[in-house]
Image (spheres, rainbow, N blue to C red):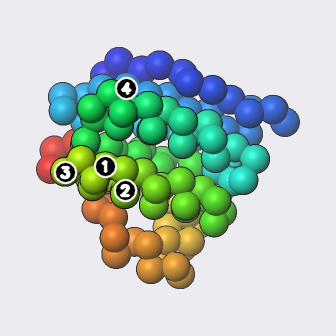
Amino acid sequence: MDHEAVGTAGLGRRLHVEVGQHGSSTVFTPAGELDHHTADLLAEPITKAVEEGATRLVVDCSGLEFCDSTGLNVLLGARLQAEARGGAVHLAAMRPTVARVFEITGADSVFSVHETLDQALQE
């Protein structure tokens, strides 16, 4: 899978995002903390990908250590963008602390959630 680093936020690289292509899936791999200080680092490449025609978005959450409500809203917004074009957002490999945010808010019921990245890419 080809990857491109699209950004990091200050404070010792609080969030790093890579974007890659795997078949028909555009894969976003955020690593670090997804919060109101870093959310644009994920939102911008997702919006760009959708504007360029991507409809199957996979977010590999394995490196995501934290996600607040702003980060959750980025992913919900990505879902709306993808669905408006007939696509979907798939979340993969969420750590328990991140999965808990989705569980508490009920957001886990509106995404396709997969235990591993491989499962998300195979669907």
**Mark 3 and 1 residues: CB-CB less than 8 Å, in contact?**
no
Marks 1 and 2 sit apart, C-alpha to C-alpha, by 5 Å
Identify which residue, 65 or 104, lies in the foreground. Answer: 104
Sequence-earlier tag: 3 or 2: 2
Mark 1: few/some/many CA within 10 Å (<14, 14-19, 20+): many
Q: Which of marks 1 and 4 is in front?
A: 1
The reply to whether residue 120 is visible in this rendering is no
- Disc 2 marks a residue whose amino acid type is Arg
Mark 4: few/some/many CA within 10 Å (<14, 14-19, 20+): some
The residue beneath circle 1 is 82
For mark 3, give the secondary structure. Answer: loop
The residue beneath circle 2 is 79
Q: In this view, does 72 lie to the left or right of 14?
A: left
- Image coordinates of residue 51 in percent, x first then y, are 36, 33
**Mark 1 and 2 residues: CB-CB less than 8 Å, in contact?**
yes
Q: Which mark is residue 22?
A: none
- The residue at the point 28 percent across, 53 percent down is 84
Q: Is residue 5 above or below residue 101?
A: above
For mark 4, give the secondary structure. Answer: strand
